[in-house]
Amino acid sequence: MDAKKTGILAILGASLMWAVEPVFAKLAYANSDYLQTSAIRAIVVALVALLYVFFTGRRNLKVTSKQFSKLFYIAIAGTIFADLLYFFALKKISVLNAVLLGHMQPIFIILIGFFFLKEDKLTRFDYAGIFIMIIAAVFVTTKTLENLFVIKLG
């Protein structure tokens, strides 16, 4: 199988896993809370990473001090805080709202890339897309026009 087909199958598999993950997390709350769910997820991820290193023979992975600070930030912000907030949100709101609002991350990626990394210039289509996504998120979270007019979320 060529690389493109492998890549397409991989992203479809990842999309399917991302689709069922919040549903399973919500079901897990019958026996646990968001903190336990996040801890179990972190432990499983660490074990999978160790197994990967063991089976691929990449025992000589070296991290420089410059790389360590970046990896530490990713671990704290991306793995600990983001997961905790995500699972906390799943505990408080419906899976549908949590997932739809969670998928607004492209807006943040675009804005962070634009302002902090000084990457690509934003076009009018970028601005239009960001605006549509924000409006859609407001509609999803307010649910009715009455709630929208009084800015009642949830």
Image (spheres, rainbow, N blue to C red):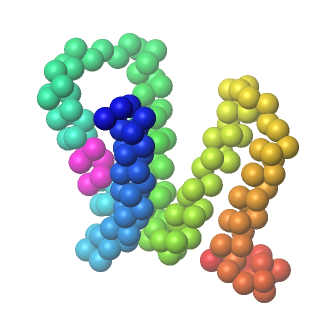
Residue 14 visible in the picture? no
Q: Residue at 72% across / 84% down in the picture? A: 144
* Residue 34 lies within the magenta run: no
**Of 93 and 1, the residue lying toward us:** 1
Q: Is residue 49 above or below residue 56?
A: below
Q: Is residue 117 left or right of residue 146?
A: left
Residue at image location 22% in from the left, 14% down from the top: 60
| Side of 139 where 25 appears, left or right | left
Asked if one can make out residue 42 in the rendered structure from this viewpoint, the answer is yes
Residue at (62%, 55%) from the top-left corner? 104
* Quarter of the N terminus within the rendering: top left
Where 151 falls versus 9 (above or below)? below
Residue 3's image quarter?
A: top left
Q: Main secondary structure of the magenta part?
A: helix
| Residue at x 42%, y 43% (from the top left corner) | 8
Q: Quadrant of residue 91?
A: bottom left
Q: Residue furthest bottom?
A: 146
For this rendering, which residue is in front, 120 or 80?
Answer: 120
Residue 146 horizontal/vertical position (percent): 78, 86
- Taking depth in this image into account, of 72 and 111 the one nearest to the observer is 111
Instruction: Classify the position of the C terminus by image quarter.
Output: bottom right
Q: Position of residue 18 (x, y in %)?
A: 41, 56
Q: How many marks?
A: 0
Q: Residue 135, located in which quarter of the rendered image? A: bottom right
Name the spot of residue 127 as percent of width and height, x first: 81, 47
Which region shows up in magenta?
Answer: 40-45
Residue 121, position in %: x, y?
79, 31
Residue sitting at the far right: 124
